[in-house]
Image (cartoon, grey):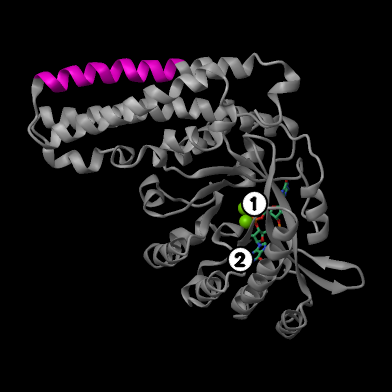
């Protein structure tokens, strides 16, 4: 903490709006577009001195001022979101909120008010909460996050890799995204083990149907590795430092040549399909060995949902559509639909009157469909890989 900073000075700063937000762009690694920004607080103490959050957030916390500060910043972010939206559609601004701030419900009520009054849409604003804070008071924080998600607000887990969240706890939290901590991202180049931490975090996010976001991306090498491995969003000095609002808007409005590719996302989809098959086969297997009681815990949630909401459907009918026109992509639609339908059949037969012969035929058909889908995904991956350089960046 900066020496000489007092509670009174901070109180005044909050009251006189000396706390300002800078905006650091986030880019989609799937298509290279600027998709939004993270709002980061700064204290403009005058005479050209701007303090970063580590200099005063601890004071705000210990003196009980953090809540007031967050409420003011929320109003600022919402104002910024309105300004941004007038100029550029479809950008989301995220802000950092401490879990204690959520407990009082003032923040969620205020967000609800902004939504009710149609000042912003739920897609315009996101909330970031750090991993270590989340795991401290799990049940309470879960309730607070659920309240926000019920309003349609996306909540991101920040600094993932610095806390000790288990996959079990993580899966119980309705986070929309995992933001890999910048330390984790930075260390990735130093050893194979650290690289694997990043790769498996991306895979885990995908299995939990969360978007993976990397922060602290400082080099082209890091950017491209993340892209090749299916990380979906990136933020860091390689893309840009945090800006004042008007500079962020100019940045987002100008033409950029950030690379983007779905190649890593397709690779993740191969994993998802194989995992889906495994989950379904677990159900059949448990039934065969007379262990029906274990079924609910092994059923892959994808099976119970509409195709468009499944992991493969979210990609195929979402951002994947940018690849429409490529033969392997277009050929995927029917087998994906068949796979989904067949998964239902297999599952309902297991829960109902299992008919051994029919189930055996379905399982074998399942195998050929999975092989077909995986093979087409590999063809698509190769087609993207071998694409001429100038057309493999940008929208592909
Ligand atoms: P964070 O939310 O993880 O934000 C990312 C931090 O990493 C920011 O530092 C950002 O400037 C920095 N950063 C971004 N890209 C790079 C990079 O490529 N390399 C390096 N070395 N650093 C990068 P900042 O702005 O100093 O914020 C630090 C932390 O303070 C934030 O971490 C967040 O936890 C907290 N914070 C920031 N704004 C707020 C706020 O409005 N409210 C609360 N409660 N906390 C905030
Ligand atoms: Mg953050
Ligand atoms: Mg962070």
Q: Is 294 placed left or right of 380 in the picture?
A: left
- The residue that label 1 is drawn on is 90
Picture quarter with ligand 1 = bottom right
State whether label 2 is within 8 Å of ligand 1.
no
Q: In the figure, residue 198 lies in which quadrant?
A: top right
Quarter assignment of residue 349: top left
Percent from the top left, x then y, of residue 329? Answer: 51, 22
The foreground one among 338 and 163 is 338
Residue 379 image position (x, y, % from top left): 52, 14
Where 379 sits versus 77, above or below? above
Please tell me whether mark 2 sits on a helix, a strand or a loop.
loop
Residue at left offset 60%, top offset 47%: 181
Q: State the quadrant of the C terminus.
A: top right
Q: Callout 2: 10 Å neighbours few (<14), some, many (20+)?
A: some
- Magenta stretch: dominant SS? helix
Q: Please tell me whether residue 359 belongs to the stretch shown in magenta.
A: yes
Q: Residue furthest right?
A: 47
Where does the image place residue 89, in percent across and percent down from the top left? 68, 53
Q: Residue at x 28, y 41 (%)?
A: 304
Magenta residues span: 357-375
């Amino acid at each position: 903490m900066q020496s000489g900073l007092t509670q009174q000075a901070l109180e005044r700063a909050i009251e006189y709006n000396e706390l300002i937000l800078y905006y650091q762009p986030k880019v989609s690694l799937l298509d290279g577009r600027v998709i939004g920004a993270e709002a980061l607080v700064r204290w403009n103490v005058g005479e050209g001195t701007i303090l970063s959050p580590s200099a005063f957030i601890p004071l705000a916390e210990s003196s009980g001022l953090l809540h007031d500060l967050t409420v003011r910043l929320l109003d600022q972010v919402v104002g910024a979101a309105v300004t941004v939206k007038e100029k550029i559609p479809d950008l989301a601004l995220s802000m950092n909120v401490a879990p204690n701030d959520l407990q009082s419900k003032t923040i969620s009520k205020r967000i609800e008010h902004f939504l009710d009054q149609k000042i912003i849409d739920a897609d315009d604003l996101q909330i970031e909460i750090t991993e270590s804070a989340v795991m401290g008071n799990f049940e309470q924080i879960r309730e607070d996050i659920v309240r926000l998600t019920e309003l349609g607000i996306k909540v991101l887990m920040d600094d993932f890799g610095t806390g000790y969240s288990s996959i079990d706890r993580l899966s119980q939290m309705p986070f929309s995204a995992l933001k890999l901590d910048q330390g984790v991202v930075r260390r990735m180049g130093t050893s194979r083990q650290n690289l694997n931490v990043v790769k498996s975090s991306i895979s885990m996010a995908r299995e939990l149907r969360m978007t993976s976001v990397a922060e602290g991306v400082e080099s082209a090498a890091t950017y491209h590795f993340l892209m090749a491995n299916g990380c979906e969003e990136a933020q860091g000095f390689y893309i840009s430092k945090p800006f004042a609002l008007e500079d962020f808007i100019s940045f987002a409005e100008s033409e950029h040549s950030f690379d983007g590719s779905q190649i890593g996302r397709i690779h993740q989809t191969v994993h998802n399909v194989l995992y889906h098959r495994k989950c379904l086969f677990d159900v059949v297997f448990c039934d065969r060995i007379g262990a029906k009681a274990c079924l609910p815990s092994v059923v892959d949630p994808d099976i119970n949902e509409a195709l468009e909401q499944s992991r493969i459907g979210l990609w195929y009918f979402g951002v994947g559509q940018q690849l429409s026109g490529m033969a392997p992509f277009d050929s995927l639609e029917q087998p994906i639909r068949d796979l989904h339908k067949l998964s239902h059949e297999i599952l309902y037969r297991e829960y109902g009157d299992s008919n051994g012969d029919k189930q055996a035929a379905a399982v074998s058909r399942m195998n050929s469909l999975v092989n077909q889908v995986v093979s087409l995904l590999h063809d698509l991956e190769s087609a993207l890989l071998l694409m001429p350089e100038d057309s493999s960046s940008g929208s592909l």
